[in-house]
């Protein structure tokens, strides 16, 4: 008798030795075993089908069943240039060579005037907040009266009142209070050197704690300079693309993305520190310098 026969014999003996109420339980066990066997056969078939294909992930994160595809694209970069060989259109619409370049353009902006920044405050801390504020207010009002007499406009930039602390032996001690008033004065070209000297001398006598002068360029001029700088940067970048396309014998070029950034470079404001020179009666010569706007663009194009 084979194994199957011996197994059946055991089952018959078991059935004869157990009550009928248990027969139904054994029957349902047979049914469960049959269901598990069918599920296992289905899973094995699905696994075999999946293994017969190559699975790759597309940029969207979806699994795609496809024949073998070359997924590597050679890339070179030098002096802000990058060339990517497109394979099967997986990196850009249509077949071709992807080129990524950067270009930089700069435009000089001529000064339209100067801006004088003046801060008036008590040089030494005063015992109470009211004393510090009153001292600052008195000097500011005197200076503003002078500005009004000269027909000079100003803009308030800040007003502050703060405690002054110092550290001794690791502990913080209150030394008093300081109040300050900040303003800016813009003078357009041509610069009146005599007026500038008068402003600086008056600010010095009215307890100005800091004075600095910077080049003034109007917002409209800056915006126009920014546009011109971007144009120049694009021209530089596109000349690189056309140059590479010519060497590679590619005639069709399509720009697929542009990214840009701009930055302004102004002359460093020069502070006026020597208060004694204000009272010399001589005008301090002021010669504002030019500013510049620099734009950088990154252009990606596909050529074929």
Image: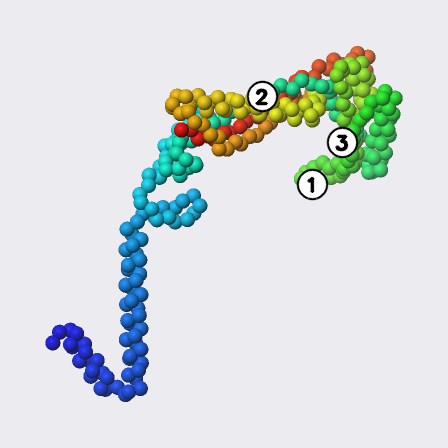
Which label sits on residue 157?
3
Q: Residue furthest bottom?
A: 19
Q: Residues within 10 Å of mark 1 (few under 14, many from 20)?
A: few
Q: Closer to the N terminus: mark 3 or mark 2?
A: 2
Q: Judge depth for marks 1 and 2 and give the one in front.
A: 2
Q: Residues within 10 Å of mark 2 (few under 14, many from 20)?
A: many
Residue 124 appears in the figure: no
Which label sits on residue 171?
1
Q: Quadrant of the N terminus?
A: bottom left
The type of colouring in the image is rainbow
Q: Which residue is mark 2?
A: 106
- Which residue is at a point 45% across and 27% down the rendered structure image? 253
Q: Judge depth for marks 3 and 2 and give the one in front.
A: 2
Q: Is residue 43 shown above or below 230?
A: below
Q: Residue furthest front?
A: 252
Q: Closer to the N terminus: mark 1 or mark 2?
A: 2
Q: Is residue 17 shown above or below 249?
A: below
Q: Position of residue 215 (x, y in %)?
A: 70, 21
Q: Is residue 59 shown above or below 17?
A: above
Say if mark 3 contacts mark 2, CB within 8 Å.
Answer: no
- Which residue is at a point 38% across and 23% down the rendered structure image? 249
Residue placed most toward the observer, 169 or 57: 57
Residue placed most toward the observer, 119 or 71: 71
Q: Residue furthest top?
A: 282
Q: Is residue 257 left or right of residue 193?
A: left
Quarter location, residue 198: top right
Residue placed most toward the observer, 299 or 16: 299
Q: Is residue 214 left or right of residue 87?
A: right
Q: Position of residue 168 (x, y in %)?
A: 70, 37
In three-dimensional space, the C-alpha distance between marks 3 and 2, rounded to whole angstroms, equals 31 Å
Q: Secondary structure at mark 1?
A: strand
């Amino acid at each position: 008798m084979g194994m199957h026969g011996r197994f059946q014999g055991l089952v018959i003996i078991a059935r004869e030795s157990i009550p009928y109420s248990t027969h139904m339980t054994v029957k349902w066990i047979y049914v469960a075993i049959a269901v598990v066997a069918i599920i296992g056969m289905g899973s094995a078939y699905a696994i075999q089908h999946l293994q017969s294909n190559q699975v790759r992930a597309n940029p969207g994160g979806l699994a795609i069943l496809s024949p073998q595809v070359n997924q590597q694209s050679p890339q070179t970069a030098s002096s802000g240039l990058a060339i990517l060989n497109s394979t099967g259109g997986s990196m850009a619409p249509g077949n071709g060579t992807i080129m990524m370049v950067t270009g930089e353009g700069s435009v000089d902006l001529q000064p339209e005037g100067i801006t004088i920044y003046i801060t008036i405050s008590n040089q030494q801390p005063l015992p109470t907040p009211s004393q510090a504020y009153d001292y600052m207010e008195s000097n500011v009002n005197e200076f503003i009266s002078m500005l009004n007499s000269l027909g000079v406009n100003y803009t308030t930039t800040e007003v502050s009142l703060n405690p002054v602390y110092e550290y001794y032996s690791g502990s913080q001690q209150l030394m008093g209070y300081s109040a300050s008033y900040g303003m800016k004065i813009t003078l357009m070209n041509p610069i009146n050197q005599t007026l500038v000297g008068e402003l600086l001398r008056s600010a010095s006598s009215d307890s100005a704690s800091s004075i600095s002068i910077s080049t003034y360029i109007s917002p409209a001029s800056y915006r126009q300079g920014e546009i011109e700088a971007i144009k120049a940067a694009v021209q530089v970048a596109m000349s690189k693309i056309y140059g590479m396309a010519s060497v590679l014998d590619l005639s069709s070029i399509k720009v697929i993305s542009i990214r840009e950034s701009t930055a302004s470079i102004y002359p460093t404001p020069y502070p006026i520190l020597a208060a004694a020179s204000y009272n010399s009666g001589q005008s301090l010569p002021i010669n504002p310098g030019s500013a510049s706007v620099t734009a950088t663009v990154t252009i990606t194009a596909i050529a074929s």
